[in-house]
Image (cartoon, rainbow, N blue to C red):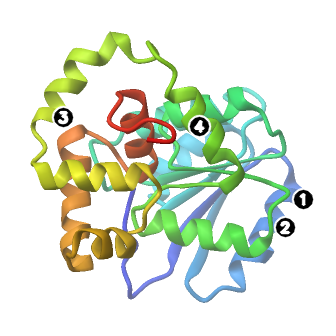
Amino acid sequence: MSEAATDRPIRVLLADDQHLVRTGFRVILEVEDDLEVVGEAADGERAVTMTRVLRPDVVLMDVEMPGVDGLAATRRITAEQEGPGGPAVLILTTFDRDDYLFAALRAGASGFLLKNGTPEALVEAIRVLARGDGLLAPELTRRVIATFARPGEAAGTAVSAEAALSELTPREREVLVLVARGASNGEIAAELHLGEATVKTHVSRVLAKLGLRDRVQAVVFAYEHGVVRPGG
């Protein structure tokens, strides 16, 4: 996912099969000086193609679309990325369903919001993803932790995960634990008595060593592989 340059607006691609929904999103976003809608796609296939051509910073992706749906499109978009630097995908759906949420995260989405949220929440989510962070609606976080923390969920990748974790320094592991607990860079800095710039560097190194795109994936990884546990 890209960290949008400070001298240009954050470039956003809209992917939704309903024209009125896309128009509504465009109206919300284009009143913001730092956001620019660069294209619209009515299905997942078109979203993948337009992402390749337009290179947006953030793709707003609906789930249920004709032909290639939003989850399949997200998998294809993120599969073409090699580490940080590609477009971030923000899933937006009307349906509050766990299967959509978990499938979206496994597909590589960097954020997940419900369409019944506020315009302000949508705008802020786009800015968060453009900065290189991940985001989940607060009401979804507990479900993510509960599901990905189930024993045996990640048995097939235990060896490779342990090898990747062994590459972390003690300080980087501390940072990973705090990220998994939902701490911001400022909160991590205060907890570990570090500067925020230093924390940002540690977070970037943790993501790189573990092969993760953003903080959402770091949270999932940490719970999935027992680095932290609910209530621990």
The reply to whether the C-beta atoms of the residues labelled 4 and 2 are less than 8 Å apart is no
The residue nearer to you, when weighing 18 against 222, is 222
Q: Residue 144 shows which numbered tag?
A: 4
Q: Residue at x 67, y 46 (%)?
A: 140
Q: Residue 175 shows which numbered tag?
A: none
The reply to whether the C-beta atoms of the residues labelled 3 and 4 are less than 8 Å apart is no
Alpha-carbon span between mark 2 and mark 3: 44 Å
Q: Residue at x 19, y 66 (%)?
A: 201
Give the label, 3 or 1, closer to the camera. Answer: 3
Q: Give left or right: position of 178 versus 171.
A: right
Vertical relation: 99 (above or below) 186? above
The residue nearer to you, when weighing 112 against 156, is 156
Point out the tag, 2 or 3, that comes first from the N-terminus.
Answer: 2
Q: Residue 20 shows which numbered tag?
A: 1
Which residue carries the number 3 mark? 165
Point out the tag, 3 or 4, that comes first from the N-terminus.
Answer: 4
The residue nearer to you, when weighing 111 against 167, is 167
Q: Secondary structure at mark 4?
A: helix
Q: Secondary structure at mark 3?
A: helix
Q: Quadrant of residue 161?
A: top left
Alpha-carbon span between mark 3 and mark 4: 21 Å
Alpha-carbon span between mark 3 and mark 1: 46 Å
Q: Secondary structure at mark 2?
A: helix
Point out the tag, 4 or 2, that comes first from the N-terminus.
Answer: 2
Q: Position of residue 53 (x, y in %)?
A: 46, 53
Q: Position of residue 77 (x, y in %)?
A: 47, 40
Vertical relation: 193 (above or below) 137? below
Q: Is residue 37 visible?
A: no
The reply to whether the C-beta atoms of the residues labelled 2 and 1 are less than 8 Å apart is yes
| Label 4 crowd (10 A; few <14 / some 14-19 / many >=20) | some
The residue nearer to you, when weighing 144 against 60, is 144
Look at label 1 and name its amino acid: Leu
